[in-house]
Amino acid sequence: MAFRWKNDLTHADVTPEAAFLNRRQIIAGMAAGSILGVGGKAQAQEALEPNAFEDITNYCNYYEFGTGKSDPPKYAGQLTTDPWSVKIDGLVDRPGDYGFDQIMEAMTVEERIYRFRCVEAWSMVVPWNGFELADLLQMAGVQSGAKYVAFETAYRPEEMPGLAYPVLDWPYVEGLRLDEALHPLTMIATGIYGRTIPNQNGAPLRLVVPWKYGFKSIKSIVRITLTEDEPPTSWNKANAREYGFYSNVNPNVDHPRWSQATERRIGGGLFSRRQPTLMFNGYEEEVASLYAGMDLAENF
Ligand code: MTE
């Protein structure tokens, strides 16, 4: 199927792959720099926020393989990604288990370069390979009563050592409103940087919603359910005050513990300047209409 959206970013904008893979060390380095007083005032202030730093180094990853800095790259290789199937059920015409090969045969995989913004105020530009989620949902036939889409990650205690720790209510779950899920920007990624997606980044199938914070990008999806009611999401269950259902990138709505108004792009140099965060992560023109009339401070 042809893509229905035109990219505004090019390979010149892409975060170097090494920076993408080593972002935790780079972010730790940036924080260390501010502790040593190398950075400006904003960085010095950041160093005084231990919570924020803890979140920076711990959040954006794959908790099923542990919350430690080096856990996901160390353990994610254990995940069996072949064979793989996704159960699509709920309000669909053709519920069932869709095999990875069956899905890939029906989809046209293409590259999209998207801004990727984490809730902890750093960002990247990532080349994803994948297909539109809408095309996958179409395979199963969305029924008219469906209003939301629920996603679930694999739950395999024998392969995922992090499941032994109740940091989240397992399995990891996420959700989108149906119109968000059907939006042409919303994709299922099967690769990054022109290669098959590494296990630690969510092989073999992970969600990418570029106008939302990174934690909405649920990894290693095994189930997609079309529902009438808003589905639960892992981070909202863990801390409803800090993480809402929508999680749209919004410089005007702060996280309760820090501002979301600026971001630092990884790969732009160790002490690269902060830049203003763009509404909907720069996809305002494409997605603002989805939220017309909604109070985004309330629906964060
Ligand atoms: N999906 C699962 N199943 N488990 C996780 O811990 N972490 C989320 C999201 N998807 C996570 C997940 C968070 S917090 C972020 S920021 C992104 O994955 C990070 O994706 P990346 O490591 O590919 O950049």
Image: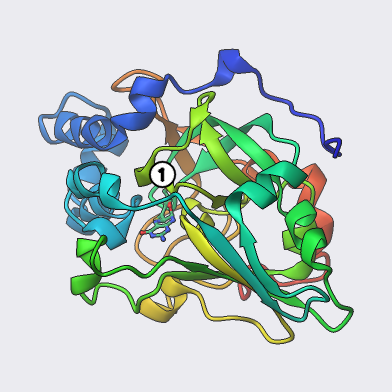
Asked if one can make out residue 116 in the rendered structure from this viewpoint, the answer is yes
Kindly tell me whether mark 1's CB lies below 8 Å from ligand 1. Answer: yes
* Residue 176 sits above or below residue 143 on the image: above
Left or right: residue 260 versus residue 208 is left
Q: Which amino acid does the dot numbered 1 rest on?
A: Asn
**Picture coordinates of residue 95 (x, y %)?**
72, 75
Task: Count numbered badges in the picture.
Answer: 1
The answer to whether 199 is drawn above or below residue 295 in the figure is above
Looking at the image, the residue that sits furthest to the left is 36
In the depicted view, which residue is nearer to us: 297 or 219?
Answer: 219
Above or below, 195 against 220 in this view is above
Task: Locate residue 94, reporting x and y percent.
Answer: 79, 73
Q: Which residue is at a point 86% across and 39% down the rendered structure image? A: 4
Please tell me which residue lies in front, 26 or 179: 179
Determine the residue positioned at 55% across, 60% down. 85
Q: Which residue is mark 1?
A: 201
Residue 79 rendering spot, x and y as whole percentages = 32, 53
Taking the image as drawn, is residue 300 in sight? no
